[in-house]
Image: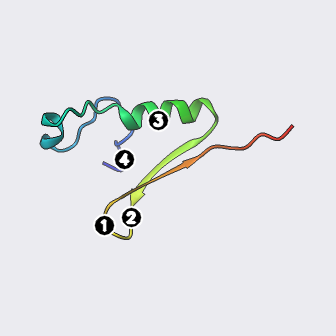
Amino acid sequence: MLKDGKNQLLMGKESRKRNGHHGLGLYIADTIIKKHNGELILSNSVNGGGKVIVKIPLLYK
């Protein structure tokens, strides 16, 4: 899931298909973040869950 988690329509476990998930959330977030020259990083948390980091550069004028 870390490698493919941002792919469109990826649902992972079979149970997510039954609970109204459509596999679009991380894909949409990644698309928007990239349009702002940012990066969406997926990794494992030290607590055993998932970790999502959003990096978006600040523009000063």
Tag 4: residue type?
Answer: Lys
Q: Residues within 10 Å of mark 3 (few under 14, many from 20)?
A: some
Quadrant containing the C terminus is: top right
The first of marks 3 and 2 along the sequence is 3
Q: Amino acid at mark 1?
A: Gly
Foreground disc of the pair 4, 3: 3
- The extreme front residue here reads 19
Give neighbour class at mark 2: few <14, some 14-19, many 20+ (Cα, 10 Å): few
Q: CA distance from mark 3 to mark 1?
A: 23 Å
Label 1: how many Cα within 10 Å (few below 14, some 14–19, many 20+): few
In the picture of the structure, the residue carrying the numbered disc 2 is 45
Please, what secondary structure does the residue beneath circle 4 have?
A: loop
Give the quarter of the image for residue 8. Answer: top left
Image location of residue 16, percent across then percent down: 18, 40
**SS of the residue under disc 2:** loop
Q: Do labels 4 and 1 touch, CB within 8 Å? A: no
Residue 50: percent from left, percent from top: 35, 57
**Which residue is located at x 13 percent, y 42 percent?**
15
Label 1 sits on a secondary structure element that is: loop
Residue that numbered label 3 is attached to: 29
| Nearest to viewer (mark 4 / mark 1) | 1
Tell me which label, 4 or 1, sits earlier in the chain. Answer: 4
Q: CA distance from mark 3 to mark 2?
A: 19 Å
Report which residue position mark 1 lands on. Answer: 48
Contact between marks 1 and 2 (CB within 8 A): the answer is yes
Circle 4 sits on which residue?
3
In the image, taking residue 13 as reference, residue 39 lies left or right, namely right
